[in-house]
């Protein structure tokens, strides 16, 4: 039988490392592309530098704006999906359990957290700062997935704006869209890692 420690190592820690390595690689690659243009402009006279950026701004923009937005949004959603899957995987009924996860109202992490607490009687770490972070991340994820990041189209706009204010790695741009900075995905990974360690420790009764 696989112990809780090994389960965490194989099915959580290793996969989070892949997310972490991917985020660091992509961010580093994008910075290098932008820096290559900055380096070419260095040493130019003011008039020459102005002309240089007029010619090359459209080439730099994808690396400084478009590609980072696409990558960060997609990675953020992927990390969230991974987290949700790992929480749901722990919602396993046994012969003494009368209810299945599908019997609980709600969906996603909220439904799973209720099942773990109320049905399986797990000491769910819902008072941890990581869980509070994850609940805010849920609002961000929903806005990206269901509204393409448009804050005004969110069903919980006030809660969403409050969540953004509480998360220094996230902002709302001038067009009213969610903007994730270069630290957000790594920050999210660290919070997911710490939270799942607490949850696995509670489920398997071991230190992870």
Image (cartoon, rainbow, N blue to C red):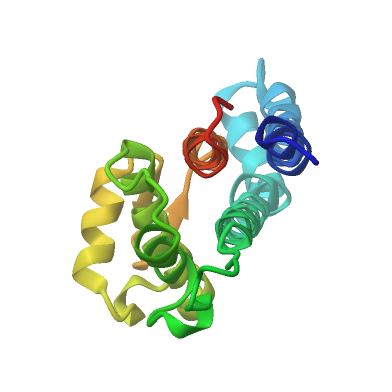
Instruction: For residue 91, say whether it is visible.
Output: yes
Locate residue 37, reporting x and y percent.
72, 32
Position of residue 206 measured from the top left corner of the image (x, y, whole percent): 56, 29
Farthest front residue in view: 96
Residue at the image point whose x is 47% and y is 64% from the top = 141
**Residue 166 to residue 75: above or below:** above
Q: Choose between 206 and 177: the one closer to the eye.
A: 206
User: Is residue 59 shown above or below 201?
Assistant: below
> Which of the 4 quarters of the picture holds residue 21?
top right
Q: Is residue 20 visible?
A: no
User: Residue, x 25% and y 72% (percent of image)?
Assistant: 157
* Residue 175 coordinates in the image, percent (x, y): 37, 67
Quarter of the image where the N terminus is located: top right
Decide which of 144, 132 is in the foreground and name it: 132
* Residue drawn at x 28%, y 64% as measured from the top left: 160
Q: Quadrant of the C terminus?
A: top right
Foreground pick, 104 / 161: 104
How far from the left and from the top, in percent, is residue 184?
A: 49, 41
Looking at the image, the residue that sits furthest to the top is: 43
Total number of numbered discs in the rendering: 0
Report the residue at 76% width, 28% height from top: 36
Q: For residue 5, what is the image quadrant?
A: top right
């Amino acid at each position: 039988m696989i112990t809780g420690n090994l389960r965490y190592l194989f099915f959580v820690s290793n996969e989070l490392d892949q997310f972490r390595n991917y985020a660091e690689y992509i961010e580093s690659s994008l910075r290098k592309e932008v820096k290559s243009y900055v380096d070419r402009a260095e040493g130019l006279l003011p008039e020459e530098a102005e002309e240089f950026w007029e010619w090359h701004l459209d080439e730099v923009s994808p690396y400084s704006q478009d590609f980072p937005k696409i990558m960060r949004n997609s990675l953020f959603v992927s990390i969230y999906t991974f987290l949700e899957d790992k929480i749901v995987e722990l919602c396993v009924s046994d012969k003494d359990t009368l209810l299945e996860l599908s019997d609980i109202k709600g969906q996603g992490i909220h439904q799973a957290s209720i099942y773990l607490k109320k049905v399986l009687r797990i000491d769910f770490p819902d008072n941890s700062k990581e869980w509070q972070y994850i609940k805010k991340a849920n609002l961000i994820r929903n806005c990206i997935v269901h509204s393409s990041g448009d804050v005004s189209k969110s069903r919980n706009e006030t809660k969403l704006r409050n969540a953004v204010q509480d998360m220094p790695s996230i902002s709302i741009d001038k067009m009213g869209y969610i903007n994730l900075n270069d630290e957000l995905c790594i920050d999210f990974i660290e919070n997911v890692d710490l939270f799942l360690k607490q949850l696995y420790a509670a489920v398997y009764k071991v230190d992870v």
